[in-house]
Amino acid sequence: MEFLTDPASIAIIIAVGFVAGFIDAVVGGGGLLSIPALLTLGLPPQLALGTNKLAASFGSVMSAFTYYRQHFFRPAFWYHCAIASFCGAVFGSLAVSVLSAAWLARFLPLLIIAMAIYTLLSPNVLGTEQTFPPKAASRARQWGTGLLLGGYDGFAGPGIGALWMVCGTRLFGMPVLYSCGLARAMTFTSNAVALTVFLSLGLVSLPAGLLMGLCMMAGAAVGARVAIRYGLPFIRPLFTIIVVLIAANLAWSAWQ
């Protein structure tokens, strides 16, 4: 990739990777920064999505492990959800390969803007910050949520962590830190599946994905610890403003 010889582009990847990993570990939605950054650097839409899956896998495994070690995620409660996310991610990532680059270039900015607006207009979307242990959700609810969100993450993925957290608090009735743990574990599942599919299709830039992924891992390690210690409200306004500005710029470029 030619842009990897440009110091400015490398600096963008490093900075965006760390910030995206941090945000993803705290409130979800790191892809709202990393995907626009990769598109802005000149990657075609399918390649940007595949490269983002490689980078996001680094961040999600680090943050999932951190929440697990702090007892905010119990794998035994959520194996149906994990299997459903696996299946959904397979179908979603395969769908990307059959869609045209032009259509994706127009669709992704709209998707990013929609997620940013939803976050902006839903200040209480993450619910309570209590830390009592939740019970397992019903099998049907886990399968329905896992298939839908796993499919979305395999297809595109911007804001998937935030969507999982919304489902954790609103659909499953979980405290916010347990929703964080669930979101990180499920996004790691769908990221790993989608990454396998994208790699088999040759839709991953390994140099860019590895560099951004290592930075995401560092950001996720810091972010998960900050979330557990301080909670979530401090990051939302800045996050939403940045996302809206980047998404608006991408939409202008794609639709003008």
Image (tube, rainbow, N blue to C red):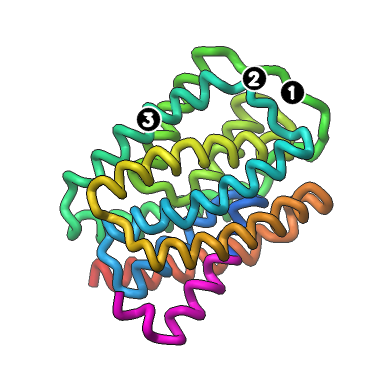
Q: Secondary structure at mark 3?
A: helix
**Residue 121: percent from left, percent from top:** 57, 51
Q: Amino acid at mark 1?
A: Pro
**Residue 169: percent from left, percent from top:** 66, 32
Q: Amino acid at mark 2?
A: Phe
At 51% across and 40% down in the image, what residue appears?
187
74 sits to left or right of 206: right
Which residues are drawn in magenta? 1-18
At 59% across and 66% down in the image, what residue appears?
18
Vertical side of 55 occupied by 138: above or below: above
**Residue 203: percent from left, percent from top:** 27, 55
Q: Nearer the viewer, residue 90 or 254?
A: 90
Could you classify mark 1 by the number of other residues whose Cα lies within 10 Å: few (under 14), some (14-19), or many (20 or more)?
Answer: some
Circles 1 and 2: CB atoms closer than 8 Å? yes
Q: Amino acid at mark 3?
A: Gly
- Furthest residue to the top? 139
Q: Secondary structure at mark 2?
A: helix
The span from disc 2 to disc 3 (Cα, nearest Å) is 19 Å
Task: From the image, tell me which residue sits under label 1.
Answer: 134
Q: Is residue 194 magenta?
A: no
Could you classify mark 3 by the number of other residues whose Cα lies within 10 Å: few (under 14), some (14-19), or many (20 or more)?
Answer: many
Image mark for residue 23? none
- Furthest residue to the bottom? 7
> Taken as a whole, is the magenta stretch helix, strand or loop?
helix
User: Quadrant of the image for the C terminus?
Assistant: bottom left
Image mark for residue 88? 3
Image mark for residue 77? 2
Instruction: Tell me the quarter of the picture where residue 138 sits.
Output: top right
- Answer with mark 3 or mark 1, whichever residue precedes in sequence: 3
The span from disc 1 to disc 2 (Cα, nearest Å) is 9 Å
**Residue 202: percent from left, percent from top:** 24, 53
